[in-house]
Amino acid sequence: MINLATLLLGILVIIGGAMADHVPLTSLLNLTAFIIVICGSVSACLLQFGFGPFMTGLKAVMWLAKPPRTDMHSFIDRIADWSAKARGLGTLVLEQEIPGVEDDFERQGLQMIVDNTPPEDFAAMLGSAADNTTRKQEQPGHVWEAIGGYSPTIGVLGAVLGLVHVMMRLDHPEELGEGIATAFIATIYGVGFANLIALPLGARLKSIAADLERERHVVIHGFVLLAEGKPGIMIRQTLKSYLADSPAAKAEPAAEQEAPQSASQAA
């Protein structure tokens, strides 16, 4: 939720600055400028990406409220348990675990373990699937960055159209000031929308996609160790070393860190 709050904060700062300078808020509202900037930017983005990727970009805005995350500590516990079962009863016993795996990527890796995929082929095959997933998850960021690139220019276009309308009414000099001010509202919309919403949102979505990519690499490494027949305690220690510097690992309470360690001794 902090991401949504900061997104709104930038807008409120601009509105607050205008009010502090005694600019009436009604002067910042202009339906024509809104239609030109927002609809024009959306149209350009649709032409570049198509309808499907654009809708994916809109849906990804919800990542600000609840970013998709892999519970890495839970995954490490699961894969250590799978290792104990595979070493004791063989890899075929893991087939009954597949229906209970919710993540498609993890399910694919576990299926490859059941199919006895050679360890040397594991990284390449899962890595290819991870690359495809990464490209899909990076797309919303590219969509919003593209919108942020188009909107300032279209805002200038709206301002020019407004000035053309003002020039056509030079015979009414008392209307020139208000008309010119209204014309530049489109520029405010374009620049403000790009720099307060679209570009920061695109960068944030790409950052989330990069975090998910790093998590998938840890998952791949875990399955490679499982395919090599490494014991659960070694898999646990190796994967936890990748998480040692992550904020989530540092924020984890000490009591929660001790529980997996005791479980690894049992494994």
Image (tube, rainbow, N blue to C red):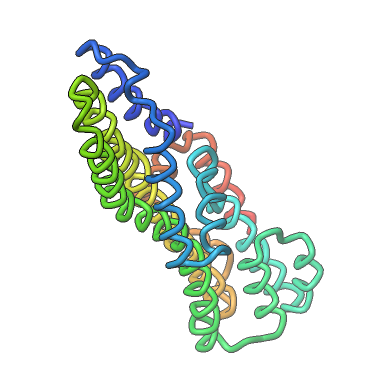
Quarter of the figure with residue 4 = top left
Residue 213 place in picture, x, y as percent: 45, 63
Residue 240 visible in the displayed image: no
Residue 65 place in picture, x, y as percent: 52, 37
Q: Is residue 37 left or right of residue 112?
A: left
Image: 267 above or below 175: below
Please state which of residues 41 and 180 is positioned toward the viewer in this rendering: 180
Please state which of residues 167 and 143 is positioned toward the viewer in this rendering: 167
Residue 114 visible in the displayed image: yes
- Give the residue at the far front of this rendering: 171
Q: Is residue 191 left or right of residue 87?
A: left
Residue drawn at 62 percent across, 63 percent down: 79
Residue drawn at 37 percent across, 38 percent down: 33
Residue 70 place in picture, x, y as percent: 55, 53
Image: 120 above or below 252: below
Quarter of the figure with residue 23 = top left
Please state which of residues 31 and 85 is positioned toward the viewer in this rendering: 31
Quadrant in which the C terminus appears: bottom right
Quarter of the figure with residue 93 = bottom right
Please state which of residues 17 and 3 is positioned toward the viewer in this rendering: 17
Residue drawn at 72 percent across, 79 percent down: 114
Image: 22 above or below 134: above
Total numbered badges shown on the rendered structure: 0
Residue 112 place in picture, x, y as percent: 66, 80
